Image (cartoon, rainbow, N blue to C red):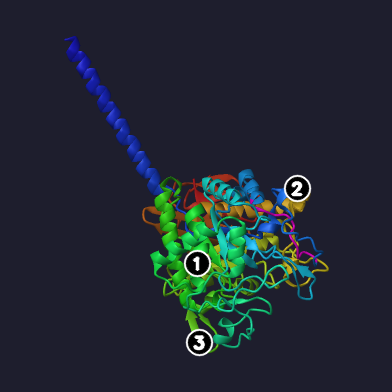
Amino acid sequence: MKKLILFTIILITLSCKDKAEDNRSSRDASAEVTETPFVWEGANLYFLLTDRFNNGDQSNDVNFNRTRKTGKLRGFKGGDIKGITQKVKEGYFTKLGINAIWMTPIVEQIHGGTDEGTGVSYGFHGYWTKDWTRIDPNFGTKEDLRELIKEAHERGIRIVLDAVINHTGPVTDKDPVWPEEWVRTDKQCTYDNYDNTISCTLVANLPDIRTESNENVELPPQLVEKWKAEGRYEQEVKELDAFFERTGHPRAPRFYIMKWLTDYITEFGVDGYRVDTVKHVEEYVWTEFKVECDFAFAEYKKNNAEKVLDDNNFYLVGEVYNYGVSSGQEFDFGDRKVNYFNPPSFQSLINFEFKYNSKDKDYEDLFKHYNAILHDELKDFGTLNYLSSHDDGSPFDAQRKKPYETANKLLLSPGTSQVYYGDESSRSLIVPDTEGDATLRSMMNWDSIAKRKRIKEVLTHWQKLGQFRAKHPAVGAGTHQMITSSPYYFYRSYQKGDFKDLVLIGLDLEQGKKVIDVSKIFEEGDVLNDTYSGKTATVENGEITIDSEFEVVLIEKK
């Protein structure tokens, strides 16, 4: 009898355990279905100059005797990878609703400086490459990059590096020109047609890589000498041999550089590349580059399964200078139109017309315009919108007089948003005694954030909108529909597989009590949350009432 009772107890225990497992599996499956997916087309991407954001390691501020007096804001200022990691750990990006960081190139820069009439300039910006295979010590080390990616990924933040295939750095007394079979220096671009935009140097003394060449070339002697001095020549050559054997590509200049750039994917697991000077390179090169990036990303995922964030593809966004989304998928050179989306190359292009659209259009016209394009001409692709940048001398709000409107239009427009470092803190874009784009590249204004009340209030607004955007793919990647024009309310809806997202937003509202008709969007009895004010309300007779001092509501289902 005792044995029978014991046996029965065991059966009941196992049965309860099985049910618990089933329930837990059910909950886990449900969590997987409802978990908010990361969507590049609606991401909130933060763009920073690595040297100008935050100095996390003062011991690496001077290298290669880069000590000549420079023009204003044309030398290294100390920002580095450790500085970015520090702000990741502090939660700065998370509080700002950032889920991707694009940083300027971190590869080793020319050692010397140039003087082109604006005073001495060093390669602090990262676009003057000397050696693609090494991180510039001013920016940090491989270990620093590995830590940044680890800390960012733990917080759901992707890392996008910057790829330059078009040119080397300028020639200086410390940086000899690369061999003639690698670069051209005899023809400067006039930009009046396709050939005069591609097969030429962007400016004087910026050697142009012969990206059109399929001829086998030897390594530049200065790289051979450098690698031997650093004790890594044999390893670099061994890896190059393996790359060319695997791919079957000729040992042409562009394929060397592709190998060097995709190593950062395979070794570190970076999530994407912003590609520089796209229209100055033959379009088929970018299709080739995509193939190598995709292969490298797949290799990283295969070798680091425990570190894989999701099933997103490798992200490629291109800088086709002066491209605007109103052109659809094509860019017009005058004598030729080129599609940089298809054949497959770029998932997205930087949108140079967004600042003009933002000046010319009110909220509804702006949002409706982008909704139409992204669900028609650019369906299955994306756009990267910005209102200020590192090389656009005509930003939307250079004097930082419209920080709230800037945030509203950038962060609430359909498409991917690019927050330029300091947009959220009104960092000045007008710096006296600077020349050219240097005025756009001052150090991040951390002191202003800490000390000035107005800056803190502006930052809070950016944080609220940014967090809402990051939490809701519907904001950037969803379908837009106006509810009423006055007061101005609209909703966004998004669906991907079993995931559904629906939000309601109001702008330029009266302060105080707001009675909002939500009957076409939410169900009777739904409990809704205004994340901007923190107030909640229950749907009654198709309406909710939000009583807040703010002119914005960001409504989600609680």
Q: Where's residue 23, x and y in %?
A: 32, 35
Q: Identify which residue is drawn at 77% across, 52% down.
A: 448
- Compared to residue 170, the image places residue 260 above or below, namely above
The mark lying in front, picked from 2 and 1, is 1
Crowding at label 1, few (<14), some or many (≥20) Cα neighbours within 10 Å? Answer: many
Task: Look at the image and say whether residue 151 sits in the magenta stretch.
Answer: no
- Residue 372 appears in the figure: no
Contact check, label 3 and label 2, Cβ < 8 Å: no
Q: Which amino acid does label 3 sit on?
A: Arg
Asked whether 415 or 121 is in front, the reply is: 121
Asked whether 40 or 472 is in front, the reply is: 40
Asked whether 514 or 36 is in front, the reply is: 36
Contact check, label 1 and label 3, Cβ < 8 Å: no
The mark lying in front, picked from 1 and 3, is 1
On residue 450, the disc is: 2
Label 3, label 2: how far apart the Cα atoms are: 51 Å
| SS label for mark 3 | loop
Q: Where's residue 66, x and y in %?
A: 75, 61
In which quarter of the view is residue 493 placed? bottom left
Q: Name the residue under label 1.
A: 258
Q: Earlier in the sequence, mark 2 or mark 1?
A: 1
| SS label for mark 1 | helix
Q: What residue type is labelled 2?
A: Ala
Q: What residue type is labelled 1?
A: Met
Label 1, label 3: how far apart the Cα atoms are: 26 Å
Give the magenta part as a residue range. Answer: 72-81
Crowding at label 3, few (<14), some or many (≥20) Cα neighbours within 10 Å? Answer: few
Q: Mark 3 points at which residue?
A: 336
- Compared to residue 257, the image places residue 51 above or below, namely above
* Location of the N terminus (image quadrant): top left
Task: Look at the image and say whether residue 77 sits in the magenta stretch.
Answer: yes
Q: Identify which residue is drawn at 52% across, 63% down.
A: 260
